[in-house]
Image (spheres, grey):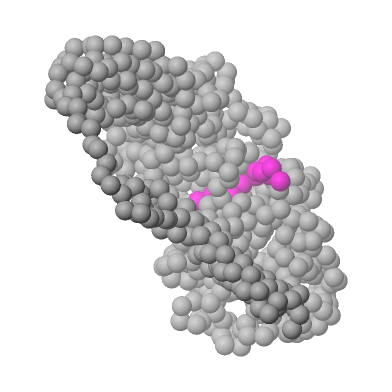
Amino acid sequence: MTIASRVKRALAFVAALALGAGLLSVASAPATAAEPPSGQLALSGNLNLHDPTVYRDGDTYYAAASHRGIWSAPSLNGPWTNIGNVPAADWTASSGRALWAPHVQKIGDTFFYYYSTSSFGTNNSAIGLKTTQTPGIPSSYVDHGGPIVTSGTLSPTQETFNAIDPAVHQDDDGNWWMVWGSHFDGIFIQQLADDMVTLVGEPVKVADRESEQFPIDNPNFNRIEGPSVFKHGDWYYLLTAWDWCCRGNGNDNTYKIVAGRSATIDGPYLDKNGVDLAEGGGSIILNSRMTQPGVTPEGLHRAPGAPDFLVEGDTVYFIYHSYMPGTVLGIRPFEWDGGWPYFPESKGPYEVTEGASYALRLQAGSIDDPNSLQNPEASETCLTSLDGLAVGAACEEPGAAQAWRLESLGDAFYQLRSQAGDRETCLTMADLSGTEGTGVAVEPCADDERQHWYFDDTGHGFQRLVGRTSNLALEATSNLPGAETAVFGGHRRDGDHQAGNLTQAAKWPYQQWRFEKLADALEAPTITTLDGAANAIVGDEVDLAVTVRGESGELVSGHVSLWQDGDQVDSATLVDGDASFAIAADEVGVLSLTARFHGAAWSADAEVVWNGSTSTELVVTVEPAPHPEPPVTPGPQEPGTAPPGTSPGGSGSGSGLASTGTDGEALSAIGLGALLLALGGMMLVALSRRSRV
């Protein structure tokens, strides 16, 4: 064997050993879990879908929509491509072969494509079914050949239902159910037989807009449609769309998404206040919104409707359309707050988080001027704590009286704690009667239902605060600029089914508030010592560097005073939140000091959001001066031994291989690598010498 080949083998052996050491080091690094999806998905491709449903086959996603189209994409983000149309069914000829609002469910290896056919504005409607095992081939969708459900009247209630907008879901016992309906007498659910075609039992009403407060005389004003049902955790959730779609001008549409939940698939479905959706209940979870940065298509997504869903592992995706002004596909993962779905955002007015503080600014505009409600702006009226009352007053540079801290109570309810004074008062409904005009005050915070509020998404960055049990909304008498106005509990006006402008009943600016974030947290600033001696020698000066910070890093201004035995001994103005002191340690013992901060905390883009005083104890142990130690004369040292305090491997407590923690692991790997390289070098020398023999 030549020297070169022996050297190559030795180098390969050393490299393998070194690589093994490196791999051991890399393998010890912990794996990071994937973050769950959040926020509206950025989509690309052909997105012009109306009433979409999304389903998956292997690695390919498909979407179906009204008017028979089929789309495909390699991911939920797209790019989405139209691949053709499913065939029209002969039995739908009387309705012009219309095909609306499909819902696709995969069962085994078969895709069930439920759809409706109708004439616009009538209940001359029916629900049909197509099936396929090759969803990427539109011509393969074979029709069942006739209607599953046709519009009709229930006996003995004489309720009329409209057989459109079908969706199916399986209950915990393995039974499949179909939910459908629109306008007329609302939304119904009924069990399917095993053939997935025949309906068994009787239909059950699960949602309707009519209530005792707002009766409906005209079915055109029972604006509810597009239902779907899914299970998450312990609850079944019913989603529907409220109000108007399909207007000639897309900007006139007022769709919004409403949710209720039930322990059983056939209801009753209750909203956050326990109101049955079949009796006018519903909590609004999504309304018109601007996109977040980086989301496409960019802009205002108006009037979301046609709710559907897709389950992927632990994530439930919300599938819908919105107007821009034509309809486009939208996809968002549901997020959850106390068992309720919601759609938070990382920036802007929907960044509403527990523990943060906000100014609440009333919406501008008037119901007498419908154009002012299409793209509403914020007014100059803010919710204000004033002498024990909640009022609307002119918005000022954010101050404590207009700052409200959100505190979660669970189940999607919150308290709003005023930051004025001692910060011990909360927004309070005067009583739980539910009477229009009930007063709203600011009272001491307590475990009191009158202080419990949830939020409806009223669109365009505004939300409505609804009181627990009373089911009244926080309403101002006026939003005129500069006017101080009373605040009271009013009936939720999206239930006001009155004739007139189509946008009027869906928007009531005096109940709609924009959350403008002031600070992430409003806890009292904390005081700590930096580089301050915990121990001192009598006769020395103790240097104390004091810093004051908000809980989440808010900036602070003011001064710190230092106290000992009830007497102030020093003070200093904060500079960038810091102050320095030098205190004489005159006596042996414990030096107990109190540092008191007086001033304000404020965020980088707002004025004062907290003011007052806070304090902390600083303890320094003062020890006597040490006696000098006699010098130590080193004795004779054995050859090869290390000096006292060291080891043969180097200085300190050990060699480079003896270390702990993360840095120690890295040093151990380095030391092992060095040892292996040294062994390799010795092998090379041996091989070289052997070759010369």
Q: As rendered, which of 472 and 162 lies closer to the eye?
A: 472
Image height of 668 relative to 83, above or below = above
Q: As rendered, which of 322 and 366 lies closer to the eye?
A: 322
Quarter of the view holding residue 144: bottom right
The residue lying furthest to the bottom in this view is 195
Can residue 576 be seen here? The reply is yes
Instruction: Indicate yes or no whether the magenta region holds residue 280.
Output: yes
Image height of 5 relative to 229, above or below = below
122 displayed left or right of 544 = right
Quarter of the view holding residue 133: bottom right
Residue 115 in the image: x percent, y percent?
Answer: 71, 72
Can residue 119 be seen here? The reply is no
- Residue at the spot 79% in from the left edge and 61% down from the top edge: 79
Q: Where's the C terminus, which quadrant?
A: bottom right
Image height of 247 relative to 267, above or below = above
What residue range appears in magenta? Answer: 276-294
Counting the numbered discs, the total is 0
593 displayed left or right of 88 = left
Residue 154 in the image: x percent, y percent?
Answer: 55, 71
Q: Where's the N terminus, which quadrant?
A: bottom right
